[in-house]
Amino acid sequence: MTSESWLVAWIGKTDHEAAEGLLGKDVGPIASSLIGTVRYSRVYLLTNYDFSRSKRYCDWLEKTAGYASTQVDLYQVDLESPIDYGAIYESVSANLKGAGLPRDDVELTFHLSPGTPAMAAIWIILAKTRFPAKLIQTSRERGLEPVNFFFDLASDFLPEYLQRTGERIIRLTQGAKEVAPEFERIIHSSAAVRQQIDLARRVAVLDVPVLVLGETGTGKELFAEAIHAASPRAEHVFVAVNCGAMSPELASSELFGHKRGAFTGAVAERKGHFQEASGGTLFLDEIGDLPADTQVRLLRVLQTGEVTPLGSSKPIKVNVRIIAATHRDLSADVATGRFREDLFHRLAVGILRLPPLRHRDHDVEILIDHFLEQINADARGRPEAQDKRLSKNARKVLLAYPWPGNVRELYHTLVRASIWSLGAEISDEDVNSALLRIERKSDGVLGRPLMQGFDLKGLLDEVARDYIARALKQSGDRKSVAAELLGFPTYQTLGNWMKRLGVDSAE
């Protein structure tokens, strides 16, 4: 039997501005739904904004709507794009599931008005499927009103889908496999890569920055070249720059240029990569390795569309599309201050996440055949050239290997194996000799070496401190909410742990 009622919503731009006194008497969508006869047991709010700003909003909301601080909960949900339907769905589902929902004793209400249209669409989908809920919306013209429409996934959609003819299903399936010619060099059969290609095709036609994330060797530059080829800038230059290969002292000079005599060694004027790429696309690989002062200058260029060469006071207009890439966790770098948050948001307009080879179902096999065919073609016409083929056991070794170096490692392993093999057949011994098995040290909790002086209790305390600090930050320093996140029965239990571990809630 229902005993609690929860209002669940994103905090939107209008809500923040209302709390900050920027909208006059308008209190915003969330407060409008809470001021009235309908009262909720719990107000469950999600934010993709700065947590401290949303925390101030919650304090204002409690006073404005007459709710106790124990009734209003705030959770940080970091979305790299507020219009990424898939990311919103996954993040919200995980958050609600973490709150123990759905529950028979909790009646949910989702507020559709705050946030982006994509956020509203996900509320509707979740309300009709995984988390049954009422829907409401607010507007200045009509005030608070329920959103009622009858739609049931099982009874409305599935029967229609199952009645489609086999011919139509085959046609739709075949259509999904078509790849734009600009992306044909990306060899794949996995759905994970196909999804990223689909996103890349859509963002290619928009003249916005793109951030490509992925481990080393996953094909970030290949995607960047394909995006450029599929864009309106295809007839112009594509310039690729490895930011990790630039010395910190010369990074700004290489990107933005310099005047003669700007620094010791500047014996001639240099244009810089931005001017060289003007009209086309500039691919900044390993963007996470840029030094701090160059990050500041890059942000300025993105904001103004102008570069100022070192040693000059006169800005020069440039027309460049930026595609950036990194193997680093830029979100973590932003959190630690290693990478500028404002620059991150400037770059992360279109985001691609390239999966590692170990997560690409069946792609290893087709890449093996593709690369071996390419290696054989390159060798033809040379003295003693042989068409190489893999033995059954050699293929098994390749398919079982985790490929930490991804596609690049697979290709070079096959090149080495074809060289090591004396005959036309590449054996499993040849493959094992060609594999570069690198022992990777781990600084993770489970990877520390057992040796004299190992302190298990101290290690566990270290883990506990980290999680308690994270829970306090996520809950806005509310011990009752933090205790619930950590699975403690009461906030007093959390307090005892904090006292024992020396954790200060103010931190």
Image (cartoon, rainbow, N blue to C red):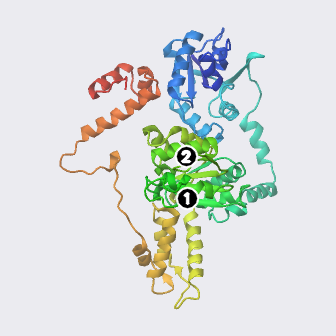
Residue at 77% of width from left, 16% of height from top?
A: 142
Task: Specify the amino acid type for callout 1.
Answer: Arg
Front disc: 2 or 1: 1
Quick check: 126 left or right of 387? right
Residue 192 screen position, x and y as percent: 60, 54
- Mark 1 secondary-structure assignment: loop
Q: Nearer the viewer, residue 149 or 23?
A: 23
- Mark 2 secondary-structure assignment: helix
Q: Is the residue 62 above or below the residue 443 in the image?
A: above
Quick check: 32 left or right of 288? right
Residue 413 screen position, x and y as percent: 47, 72
Q: Nearer the viewer, residue 424 or 266?
A: 266
Q: Is the residue 66 above or below the residue 195 in the image?
A: above
Of label 2 and label 1, which has the lower sequence position?
A: 1
Q: Is the residue 173 above or below the residue 351 in the image?
A: below
**Quadrant of the frame with the N terminus:** top right
Q: Nearer the viewer, residue 97 or 226?
A: 226
Residue at 42% of width from left, 29% of height from top?
A: 471
Task: Judge the density around disc 2: few (<14), some (14-19), many (≥20) Cα neighbours within 10 Å.
Answer: some
Q: Which mark is residue 298?
A: 2
Residue 476 screen position, x and y as percent: 46, 23
Q: Is residue 496 visible?
A: yes
Q: Is residue 190 visible?
A: no
Q: Are marks 2 and 1 in contact (CB under 8 Å)?
A: no
Q: Nearer the viewer, residue 365 or 264?
A: 264
Residue to which mark 1 is pinned: 270
Q: CA distance from mark 2 to mark 1?
A: 17 Å
Residue 422 screen position, x and y as percent: 45, 86
